[in-house]
Image (cartoon, rainbow, N blue to C red):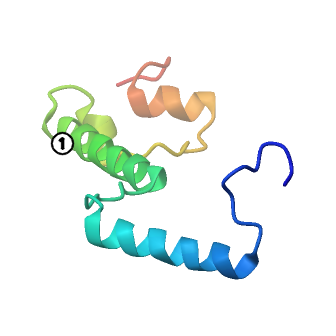
Amino acid sequence: MKKGTKGLNQNKKNTAVDLLQLAKEVITKGDPFFLPKPLSYLKSEIRTAALRIWQDNWDNGETGRSTHDIVPGVSNKPVGWNKEELMFVTGQGPFPS
């Protein structure tokens, strides 16, 4: 017998029987447990909740109403506007009101 393998079955048939016995013991005597959901699911739930809170704040806020009329929905994706368009929409540029 090789060093470090003391007590291990070298015979594949006996090893398979040992594994089946171990599996049966785990099923009959083991404690049940629940697998957590995947990390991707958790990230999706957090992202959805954050966007929901952000949208609620945007809909019920007191500032940015003119911008809200143009962009009523929040998103974490860039809108693709240039500097001048952003200044015009937010009323921060040199445009007469």
Furthest residue toward right? 2
Residue at 44%, 56% (x, y): give it: 38
Label 1 belongs to which residue? 56
Furthest residue toward front? 1
Q: Is residue 35 visible?
A: yes
| 64 horizontally vs 82: left or right | left
| Residue situated in front as seen by the camera: 78 or 32 | 32
Element at badge 1?
helix
Residue at 59%, 29% (x, y): give it: 84
Residue at 59%, 40% (x, y): give it: 81
> Picture coordinates of residue 58 (x, y %)?
23, 37
Q: Is residue 71 visible?
A: no
For the N terminus, the quadrant is bottom right
> Picture coordinates of residue 27 (x, y %)?
33, 72
For the C terminus, the quadrant is top left
| Residue situated in front as seen by the camera: 97 or 1 | 1
Residue at 63%, 35% (x, y): give it: 82
> Picture coordinates of residue 72 (x, y %)?
30, 49
| Amino acid, disc 1 | Asp
Image quadrant where residue 46 sits: top left
> Picture coordinates of residue 79 (x, y %)?
54, 45
| 38 relative to 80, above or below | below
Image quadrant where residue 29 sits: bottom left
Mark 1 crowdedness (10 Å alpha carbons): few <14, some 14-19, many ≥20: few
| 11 horizontally vs 64: left or right | right
| 78 horizontally vs 26: left or right | right
| 73 relative to 61, above or below | below
